[in-house]
Image (tube, helix red, strand yellow):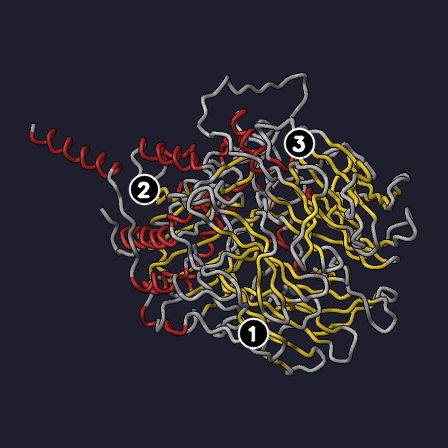
Amino acid sequence: MKKLLLSTTLLLVAVASEGQDFKYQTPPKALQDLLLAPLTPRVSLASDGRTMALLQVQDYPTVAELAQPELRLAGLRINPRTNGQSRVSYAVGIKLKTLPNGAEIEVKGLPAQARISDVNWSPDNKTIAFALTVPGSGTDGRVELWVADVAGATARRLLATPLNDAFGNSFDWVSDSKTILACTVPAGRGTAPAADAAPTGPAVQESGGGIKTAARTYPDLLKNPADEKLFDYYATSQLVKVNVADGNTQPLGQPGLIQTASPSPDGKYVLLRTRHRPYSYTLPISRFPQRIDVLDLTTGAAVKSVVDLPLADAVPIGNDAAPTGPRNHAWRADVPATLYYVEAQDGGNPKTKADIRDKLYTLEAPFTGAPQELAALPLRFGGLSWGTSQLALVGGYRWADRHETTWQLNPSKPTAPLTVLFEGSSEDKYKDPGTPYEHRNGQGKSVLLTGGPTGQSLYLLGAGASPEGDRPFVDELDLSSKKTIRWWRSQAPVYEVPVAIIDASGKNRQLLTRRESLTQSPNYYLRDATKKDKLTAVTKFPNPYAAFGGSFPKQVLKYKRADGVDLTANLYLPPNYKKSDGPLPTLMSAYPLEFKDKNTAGQVSGSPYTFTRLGGGSPVFWVTQGYAVLENASVPIVGEGSKDPNDTYIEQLVSSAKAAIDEGARLGVVDADRVGVMGHSYGAFMTANLLSHSNLFKAGIARSGAYNRTLTPYGFQGEERSYWQVPEVYNAMSPFNYADKMKTPLLLIHGEADNNQGTFPIQSERYFSALKGQGATARYVVLPAEAHGYTARENLLHVLWETNAWLDKYVKPSKPAN
């Protein structure tokens, strides 16, 4: 009888612990201080390279700020108080600096505790436009359009009418630098529909007729007619033309669900993308019906109705799939007013045999003629860079074998044969030629920077991946001779990244770079690429960890998996660690990636010379608690030839983790009997699988993951096949199916408002229930108001506390915890 009473008491304690009002906890002081170390400003550079805006970053918001009202509609997240996006990383101040040695001048006229976003330079670089959010206390919040005069370093509100920033990017400069196009809240729109109004009937959906309308699992979809009314109310805007000098406005066209409004390079027209009904309850706004129109920017009158596209609900599943009909409408950046767009020639289905996948068309103002075919692509369209009347670059890709090609084309000779400029595997980082550099022209549009002795040169900026790690570079490519001259490359023991080409015409070859090292935090420099050591510091941002020793030294480990694939991991050790201290309890983090070639899978990524900045999800915090850390351990999942990577996912996953632990043990710093593993999103999925299918770890921490792949039946990550095509793969990869095999303690953490595709909170909720039902040791922490990534100060500190307590209980002890 006494034994029965004791068991009942224990059960009551367990139940009470689940329902208690659990308060936020804070981690050890070292972890707390590191998380809250000063944030480094962001920078925004004028297109002429003469002035830099330094944007002071907002500190971590409180959970109360994060928990403001939020509407989740059609894939958007809207704050109904402001009619803006609900989750924005703001700047709270602006300083202007003339390069290279000008003083940092604070912009005056901003309100206290300003919330600044979407900083946008005018084409002439004399004015900066930005959105300023006024949170309000009820329904009186708003997003305002502001401008700052660069010469005077003064800011002012430009527009009394609030912006409609539900889609973001709610304004754009016209090429004259005197006018801004803005999407505003329509005048007199009235009060919002009641979100809690009694329904007038059920929500109904139908399918049939043999039409396949498969889609991946999207978050934040419309659910019922009430959602549709709210969406109409908050997403509808009025396009206006704003005079920057006096703030006077002129309406253009009629109110609508305006997703984008882009002025033509010559400032005479507006390209308008408007969404409309019928809406979908299974797809986000990016697939809703859309109408493409051209308006006269002077009068607002309709000039051309380009196309009206239906709901894109029959797009095949696959990374190379595309909707039928014209798509990707935009302005050609290098001429006054010419539209371009792409249209699939294979029904948008990559499995259809076709010599031509996509065709590229142009339509020149006044838009009365027939579209002109510019190029026929044997691969799916992957992007386009405009240069001159004789030069443009177009990219194409094929996901099945990761092939990609960049072609050179002459816009003045439509349908002329394409010239291959680069081609190869997107996975082959060592052979990546770099990205053609674009700059803003006088109309504020991005075009290829050309130059060289004959004016036929392009400039390529690349990561410079190599067996020694990334060594960024700048190359000059002569298109006539196809010869490349290397301007500059980052040299050990620093990591330096080209940010902008300031001068390509003179003898100086001047670059703006961001430079850092293991012990030096990132700062910006002007570099003369013709002289090895000629550097001029532009910023002097302090080391955020000066009070903690200044840096976290790392060692890049290189080792092999059992099947011969090369692997790497970053090893961090506690300060003042000595080899005589012996093996340490260890924390490993990773994120699996799919590959089609084991040689490219084994290529080194990252640099051994980067400065380590600790974000909220970093494992490196725990070197301060006596742990060795294996960070970013490579976990390639390879499927060569006709094999798909996920066919042997579990085997490769376990083998990769074992190889990392074995290498750390061989070095004498990792105690192979005391290793924990952590991961976020797909890394959380990895963590649960490692605990389910190996005995390598003492505990795991899985944040915001997906654990039952039958809940993402139309593909996930790089997996294109559906559940019904390969049920054995989906089942084998789902740790939910192995809850009865779990013998290792697992800490599950999830944001209650996760907005990522496929990682709905129900994934963790159901997985925890399964683990609990099977008697596994698990803990499930739900973070209030958090999305897929965590941002609130209280939540970030609490996650550090939870993780530290879990590791100290289950990993650090030499003997297993009870």
Q: Disc 2 and disc 3: Cα gap in Å?
A: 45 Å
Sequence order check, earlier mark of 1 and 2: 1
Q: Amino acid at mark 1?
A: Val
Q: Position of residue 794 (x, y in %)?
A: 35, 52
**How many numbered discs sit on the rendered protein?**
3
> Could you tell me if residue 729 is visible in this image?
no
Q: How far, Cα to Cα, is label 1 from label 2?
A: 42 Å
Label annotation for residue 668: none
Q: At 37% across and 52% down in the image, what residue appears?
A: 676
**Front one among 142 and 70:** 142
Nearest the viewer among 222 and 78 is: 78
- Disc 3 residue type? His
Q: Are marks 2 and 3 in contact (CB under 8 Å)?
A: no
Quick check: marks 1 and 3 in contact, CB under 8 Å? no
Query: Distance between the Cα atoms at labels 1 and 3?
Result: 52 Å
Spot occupied by residue 182 in the image (x, y as percentages of width and height): 65, 48
Q: Earlier in the sequence, mark 1 or mark 3?
A: 3
* Residue 239 sits in quarter: top right
* 790 relative to 498, above or below: above
Q: Residues within 10 Å of mark 2 (few under 14, many from 20)?
A: some
* Helix, strand or loop status at disc 3: loop
Please provide percent x and percent y for residue 298.
78, 48
Q: What label sits on residue 779 in the rendered view? A: 2
* Residue on which the image places disc 1: 494
Residue displayed at 61% across by 36% down: 285
Q: Secondary structure at mark 2?
A: strand
Quadrant in which residue 763 is drawn? top left
Specify the amino acid type for callout 2: Arg
Residue 787 in view: yes
Q: For mark 3, what is the residue?
A: 276
Circle nearer the N terminus (2, 3): 3
Location of residue 377 in the rendering, given as x and y in whole percent from the top left corner: 82, 44
